[in-house]
Image (spheres, helix red, strand yellow):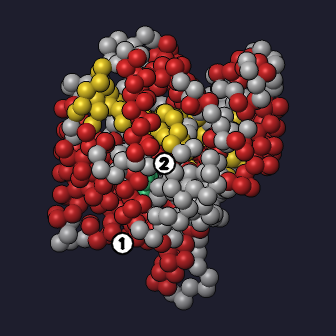
Amino acid sequence: MSAANAPLHRRSIAELREALAEGRVSAVELVEHFLDRIQRLDRRLNALITVTGEQALTQAREADARRARGQARPLEGIPILHKDIFCTEGVRTSCGSRMLDNFVAPYDAAVVSRLREAGAIMLGKTNMDEFAMGSSNETSWYGPVRNPWDLERVPGGSSGGSAAAVAARLAPAATGTDTGGSIRQPAALCGVTGIKPTYGRVSRWGMIAFASSLDQAGPMAPSAQDCALLLQAMAGFDERDSTAMDEPVPDYAAALERPPDRLRIGLPREWFGDGLDAGVAQVVEAALGVLTELGAELREVSLPSLKLSVPAYYVVAPAEASSNLARYDGVRFGYRCREPRDLHDLYVRTRSEGFGAEVKRRILIGTYALSAGYYEAYYRKAQQIRRLIREDFLRVFAEVDLLAGPTSPTPAFRLGERTRDPVAMYLSDVNTIAVNLAGLPGMSVPAGFSQELPVGLQLVGRDFDEGRLLAVAHRFQQATDWHRRTPSHFD
Ligand code: GLN
């Protein structure tokens, strides 16, 4: 089927842009098409927390008018979804928590305003693990999201709503955030493409903080090309985020077309060991075969400190979370318990009732790790390990240009399968967490299926090498069609 007569939800952003530019479709038609899909299909998925239909239609009319005046911007009229961790002016921003169920942000996050200024239209806000803590979307106050490939399975997390919505083509693309794998792991489990940029590439301003030294926003979409178009709008310096890097933003779309020079790909031994599902291993092997045919040289490498990444992360991330989440006290905004007896009662009951079990577990771990007497043993040690992990990566990147392997050691697991065992849940991110600790860019690319469930190939690059990651993923996607497959009930 050629792009010109494919249904609107089966087209890429580049194809939609062309159709809009040639007047074959209007932004209003596009928005109506996706709102209709959301209304009909999201009942089965629970991928959205809030739908902003009226606002989207108003914006679509403005987009069409702008285009008629010859003032169309790069993403003019392209509908997208935002993870509900991004503040949106006048629209509820819940972060998947009861604590913020009634919170209407007074301003837009940088990611939201940048995409809007590029012409993109927000259709709504996606479901997520509470405060982005989780790997299955089961910690959300709004209930779990279901994986469109198998409704009895999880979509991954914490950006599970974004991943499921994109996989079911409820929107052409969505935003996500990734602290330890929350863009890449759900992208892998739902069969979509997602990129976590280098720490500092995208402004965190207005993105609700979980672990500030690890959090990073990025796009999720069917293809690397779509992600490139979105990242173009999202990336760049922002003086309101002191960790945003003042690095020029390359032309990512142009990077896709550049012929890759010699490409040396490292395969970290640690990603291919125990715990790797046999079906996933097979798919990844086949994907590496495709990369070889495209001219890549593969070589095994080793990152010995990687085995320490999950324990180090579960000290650093909860420590930062316990500090970031101290602000939810029932005084200024968000949930407040009923009829507090005094200030102490207000704090205790607000936080007991407003936070879910996983968030409380993190606050307890973090507070413990930061307390006098334990700080040296846990927090400082974890920071030292973090440094060793980054050094491992830098050493390997002197020899190879990027790393490849499985994003997740298993395909999507069943709802409830890991909820009673936090460590089993934490290990879902065993291949992604180190990348955040090192601050490097990483992405997940649909690579095939194991027992009818999608499998993702993870690519990790040097600092600010998003262009190369996207280019390699794009070449892979020109040679394969995994990223075009859609789950049968969501055709
Ligand atoms: N699953 C990891 C956690 O629960 C990572 C989450 C994330 O990247 N936001 O912390």
In the rendered structure, find residue 186 and report the number of the disc placed on it. none
- Residue type at mark 2? Pro
Q: Residue furthest bottom?
A: 341
User: Mark 1 = which residue?
Assistant: 364
* Viewer-side residue, 230 vs 220: 220
Quarter in which the N terminus is drawn: top right
- The vertical placement of 388 against 231, above or below, is below
Q: Nearer the viewer, residue 37 or 463?
A: 37
Q: Secondary structure beneath disc 2?
A: loop
Q: Quadrant of ligand 1?
A: bottom left
Mark carried by residue 411: 2
- In the rendered structure, the answer to whether residue 284 lies left or right of residue 190 reads left
Pinpoint residue 352: horizontal percent, then vertical percent.
50, 78
Separation of residues labelled 2 and 1 (CA atoms): 30 Å
Where is residue 414? Give x, y as percent: 54, 59
Q: Is residue 374 visible?
A: yes
